[in-house]
Amino acid sequence: MAFSETMLRHAWAWAGGECECKHDGHGHSERCTAVLKWEKRGKLVPGGWECVLQTPLEQGGAERAENFLIVCLRCHRKMRKKSEL
Ligand SMILES: [Zn+2]
Ligand SMILES: [Zn+2]
């Protein structure tokens, strides 16, 4: 999914450079808070991350920073797996 750089920066500032995932069953309690690096977006390396929509567009979610979730790639992969089932 292509997000604008501006919105990504906004969401990133909200996340404070840490994974915002709060999924149960990911092995982290409450929020994940993995420390991320801006320049590692989409890379499967320590500090790698992706931006996802908290509420998908097809479920009425908006393409706005408030609906963005910055997640580490470990969480991102787990989320993908879940939705592929
Ligand atoms: Zn995470
Ligand atoms: Zn997670």
Image (cartoon, rainbow, N blue to C red):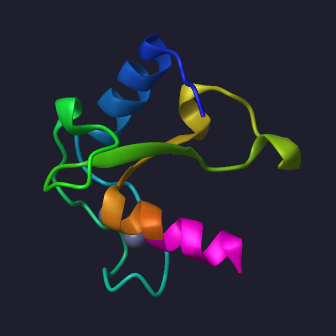
Q: Magenta stretch containing residue 79, yes or no?
A: yes
Relative to the observer, which residue lies in front, 53 or 15? 53
Q: Nearer the viewer, residue 81 or 37?
A: 81
Q: Please tell me which residue is depicted at 71% across the width and 49% down the height of the picture.
A: 55
Q: What residue is rendered at 24% in x and 60% in y?
A: 33
Residue drawn at 43 percent across, 24 percent down: 8
Secondary structure mostly seen in the magenta stretch: helix
Report the image quarter containing ligand 1.
Answer: bottom left
As drawn, the residue found furthest toward the top would be 6
Residue 85 percent coordinates (x, y): 71, 81
Q: Is residue 2 left or right of residue 43?
A: right
Considering depth in this image, is 47 or 7 the residue closer to the camera? 47
Residue sitting at x 40%, y 81%: 26
Give yes or no for residue 23 being in the magenta stretch: no
**Lateral position of residue 53 relative to residue 18, left or right:** right
Horizontally, residue 47 falls left or right of residue 22, namely left
Instruction: Give the extent of the magenta segment.
Output: 78-85
Q: Position of residue 43 (x, y in %)?
A: 27, 46
Q: Name the quadrant of the N terminus.
A: top right
Report which quarter residue 46 is drawn in.
Answer: bottom left
- Up the image or down, 30 lies above or below 77; here it is below
